[in-house]
Amino acid sequence: MKLSWHGQSCIKIVTDSGHYILIDPFITGNNMSDLDPNTVEADVIILTHAHEDHIGDTEPIAQRTGALIVSTVEIAAFFEAKGLKTHGMQMGGKHLFEFGEVKLTQAIHGSSYEIDGKPFTLGLAAGVLFTADGQTIYHAGDTALFSDMKLIGAYKKINVAFLPIGDNFTMGPEDAAIAAQFVQAEKVVPIHYNTFPLIEQDGKGFCDSLPEEQGLYLEVGQEFELT
């Protein structure tokens, strides 16, 4: 399995079976992104919640590629009404797809989307546990620190956790360091920072603060492999 970070909370996963999975593909308007929404490959798009900096380019990518959109039932219904392929879930539920297993977890955050200039709530925000190729990835989505992250870490061995550190809208670095302890991931990658002035943080400094080389600092577009 190959993983890469593409600014904000956008993660690309390429499984050993050759499936291309995008989580929260915020590309257009993301000055950190190195992806092109007109050419990026996607078999599956997983969405943690409905905010624009997470839904991002989901619709045009899914229209072009035919990608399956996996998210909460409310977000799935929103895109299904547009004629796109979807699979709706809810927190605590899991489903085994041909590309891997997806389980939605709790996240403490909002989930609204602007339609015709007005905000509409689309269910609850979620985190994602993705398992494939014998590896489990935890994408926390946008969230505050919460003590039940200990249960997420106890549920299944987590190889890599993607945790937001931007503060103001999500956990900051201090709380994210506690979250890293709670989930007990082998590696922790900071996300959701430096996209806007309000969430500027030192990602490398955060990684250096974690124990025993747990922190994994990634440049945008940098790929690493789990074996």
Image: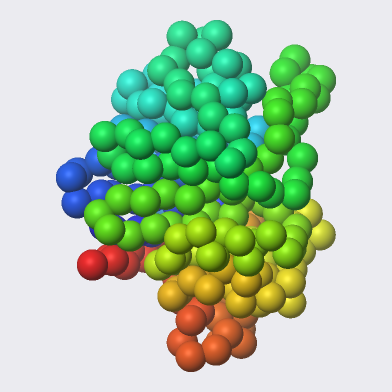
Residue 110 in percent (x, y) is at 77, 40
Residue 55 in percent (x, y) is at 58, 34
In which quadrant of the rendered image does the N terminus lie?
bottom left
Residue at position x 46%, y 87% in the image: 213
Image height check: is 209 above or below 113? below
- In the image, 56 versus 70, the foreground residue is 70
Residue 59 in percent (x, y) is at 49, 23
Residue at position x 25%, y 54% in the image: 133
How many numbered marks does the figure carry? 0
In which quadrant of the rendered image does the C terminus lie?
bottom left
Name the quadrant containing residue 180.
Answer: bottom right
Q: Is residue 134 left or right of residue 157?
A: left
Residue 155 in percent (x, y) is at 51, 59
Q: Tell me if residue 123 can be seen.
A: yes
Image height check: is 118 above or below 225? above
Q: Is residue 12 left or right of residue 164?
A: left
- In the image, 156 versus 25, the foreground residue is 156
Q: Is residue 77 left or right of residue 65?
A: right
Residue at position x 74%, y 31% in the image: 112
Residue at position x 42%, y 35% in the image: 95
Image height check: is 177 above or below 80? below
Q: Tell me if residue 201 can be seen.
A: no
